[in-house]
Amino acid sequence: MRKSMILPGLAALIMLVAASCTKDPLKDMTAEDSRIYITNYDSTANFGSYKTFSIADSVAVIDNGRATKEITPTDQAYLDAVKKYMQQQGYVLVNKSQSPDLGMNVSRIYRTSTGVISYPDYWGYYGGYWDPYYWGYPGYGYYVPYSYAVYSVTEGAISVDMLDLKSAKTTNKISIIWTGPIRGSGILNASVADSQVKALFDQSPYIKAN
């Protein structure tokens, strides 16, 4: 029977070469690989019952606790992409003065933190940045039906949120019925805005007007 033998020094050299050829999953991750799309929605919402929508004309920028409104080329690209895919799903874009059924918000979030959050608390801070008066319902608050989630934002995120304005007249509250945060490298670039929003809608086939 033939036996194979590797000298200790040679074995160490082979192990070193093999290790150098092994890819580091994080080091070799592309910008696309790093992106995460998290969609959540109110399971009681009938998305087919809504016909019209309006979208905020600027983006809410939440930077480590400080909130402002901006409209950069990247912001406009995200707003345009949301309009495009909402219309592709059969919803009609109208002015906010025309009592739209749905309101769409886009936010940029910059914060380095991890933990467990309660959605009502989270959107009381972030989603609540848009005063309900903007959508024609002064004095109303934001209501989110979800419970808890784990979050981690380290280099910035984009969030697209859908508000139920149709029911606000009878419930006296604006419900966020769908939310789509996007995280990962390179998302704050106008050239990728369309594909990022498309990924959210691809992940949410229930968003469709009858």
Image (cartoon, helix red, strand yellow):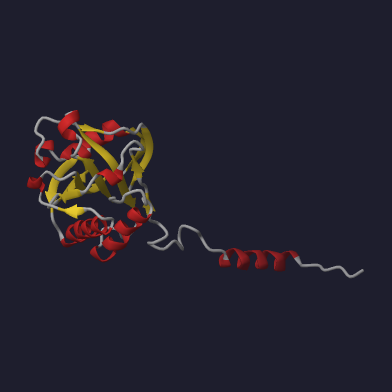
Residue 44, image x and y in percent? 34, 36
Q: Is residue 64 visible?
A: no
Q: Quadrant of the N terminus?
A: bottom right
Name above or below for residue 156 compared with residue 129.
below
The one of 97 and 48 positioned closer to us in this rendering: 48
Left/right of residue 86 with respect to residue 131 in the rendered view: right
Q: Is residue 121 visible?
A: yes
Left/right of residue 71 with respect to residue 192 in the rendered view: left
Name above or below for residue 7 compared with residue 115.
below
Work out which residue is located at the far left of the displayed protein and give it.
97
The one of 64 and 40 positioned closer to us in this rendering: 40
The one of 3 and 138 positioned closer to us in this rendering: 138
Work out which residue is located at the far right of the displayed protein and give it.
1
Number of marks in picture: 0
Residue 159, image x and y in percent? 27, 48
Left/right of residue 171 with respect to residue 200 in the rendered view: left
Q: Residue at x 9, y 47 (%)?
A: 98
User: Which picture quadrant has residue 189?
Assistant: bottom left
Name above or below for residue 79 compared with residue 123.
below
The one of 18 and 77 positioned closer to us in this rendering: 77
Work out which residue is located at the far bottom of the displayed protein and give it.
2
Q: Residue at x 38, y 36 (%)?
A: 149
Residue 55, image x and y in percent? 16, 50
Left/right of residue 23 with respect to residue 95 in the rendered view: right
Name above or below for residue 124 compared with residue 82.
above
Work out which residue is located at the far front of the displayed protein and give it.
210
Q: Residue at x 53, y 63 (%)?
A: 23
Q: Residue at x 31, y 32 (%)?
A: 145
